[in-house]
Image (tube, rainbow, N blue to C red):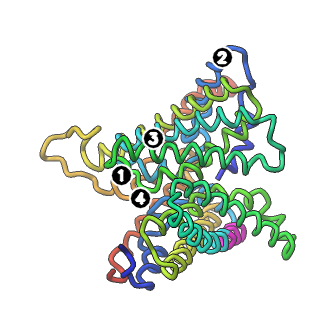
Amino acid sequence: MNSNLSLSYIFIDSLLIHNFVLSVFLGMCSFIGISRKQATATRLGLAVMFVIVASSALCYGTNLILVHYQTEYLRIILYIVIIAAMVQFTEMFIKKTSPALFRELGIFLPLITTNCAVLAVPLFQTSREYTLAQSVVFSVGASGGYLLAMFLMSVIREHMELSDPADLSRGAVLTLIIAGILSLSFMGFAGMGGG
Amino acid sequence: MGHKGDDAGQHGVAYTPDGGIDAFLSGLWEQNPVFMQVLGMCPTLAITNTVQNAIVMGLATLFVLVCSNAMVSMVRKLVPKQVRIATFILLIATAVTVVDYLVKALSVPMYRALGPFIPLIVANCIILGRAEAFAAKNPVIPSAMDGLGVGAGFTFALACIGAIRETLGAGTFLGHPLFGNHFQPWILFQLPPGGFFALAMWLAGLNAWRRYQERPRELAEAA
């Protein structure tokens, strides 16, 4: 159905036009909860990116098997198992290669499993019937969009720390308003790439 | 992500022998997942452009919450601590698969409107959060009641946000026109930024209300 879309369009579309965080509303919890410090936010973004790209390719293969044996109803369950395994693998990998980073990310690493952006990539690529190449490009674009949004938000919030916002905007309110304005500006990308 | 789930555990109500009414009521307001704990943001922002979508999404989540809480509570003594999160997620994924096919069977237009957000209930942090904070420690009936309460609180919050977005963004409520022909819809509220702004409005309103509640006490302390 979508197999004639060009790879560059899929990339720009998932990175900017339909940015996973700012216009499809995925991965919101980490976007609001873990965007206070730029360093942590970017590193988490990179870890999520790795999990998304790897699990998306694995899920593509799994889906072929599921379709072959006509057991599509197992899709959600298998996808989440693959993602959980990938997260576990990433956790062990980071622990081995960079114990400092492991300590810094701490509890947030295992929670990548319940980041809906991670599950959404394989679900979208399945429902849009992307080919393998399209799926890989889509997963890189989408997770790059997540990283971009995390980076922008954390940089803005680091600056906001120094200001003195109104009392009413305690808690998540200020973050949500910033996100709304970011989302407005990302709407300007609509129509890019031509389709 | 359920990074606030641990926090919720500390405030989690202990099991009381009244059949879980307390668990139900506390989930509805005191521990309202959206307004109080700011969890489960993805569907809260994405599926609230109309009240109807918001309510269906809320009910689907409620169903998953009740099922997963009950199942988690049933197996809570059998599962070793190390693999409990994986087990919980599998149970949740099973419940979500049921809802996915249920919504598809009941209403195809609704299924299209909610799109990928039905399977994404698996990754809704509220559900894993309740499994971990409440169902893993309590018997089946209070756990199911807790799921019912939190699910009802979630549905209520989604409907509140949906009400703002549909009234301002389309000038209708549950599909009925409200303002007559001269109304220019404020399209922004139907688009993604409107979701952020509508939720920010509710949370700011709650902050204002809380401040108003605290005022007499502050005055008394100052005197």
Q: Chain of mark 3?
A: B
Q: Is residue B138 left or right of residue B51?
A: right
Residue furthest top as drawn: B18
Picture quadrant of residue A60: bottom right
Q: Secondary structure at mark 1?
A: helix
Residue type, numbered disc 3:
Leu
Q: Position of residue A187 (x, y in %)?
A: 38, 69
Distance between the alpha carbons at the discs numbered 2 and 3: 27 Å
Q: Chain of mark 1?
A: B
Disc on the earlier residue, 2 or 3: 2
Q: Which residue is mark 3?
A: B158
Q: Which residue is mark 1?
A: B113
Q: Nearer the viewer, mark 1 or mark 4?
A: 1
Residues indicated by labels 1 and 4 sit on the same polypeptide chain: yes
Q: Nearer the viewer, mark 2 or mark 3?
A: 2
Disc on the earlier residue, 1 or 3: 1
Seen at 53% across and 70% down, the residue is A64
Q: Residues within 10 Å of mark 1 (few under 14, many from 20)?
A: few
Distance between the alpha carbons at the discs numbered 2 and 1: 37 Å
Residue type, numbered disc 4:
Pro
Q: Is B170 contained in the magenta span?
A: no
Seen at 45% across and 84% down, the residue is A7
Task: From this view, report whether residue B172 is shown above or below residue A161.
Answer: above
Q: Is residue A180 left or right of residue B20?
A: left
Q: Which mark is residue B193?
A: 4
Disc on the earlier residue, 4 or 3: 3
Q: Which mark is residue B19?
A: 2
Q: Is A46 contained in the magenta span?
A: yes
Q: Which residues are magenta?
A: A38-47
Disc on the earlier residue, 4 or 2: 2
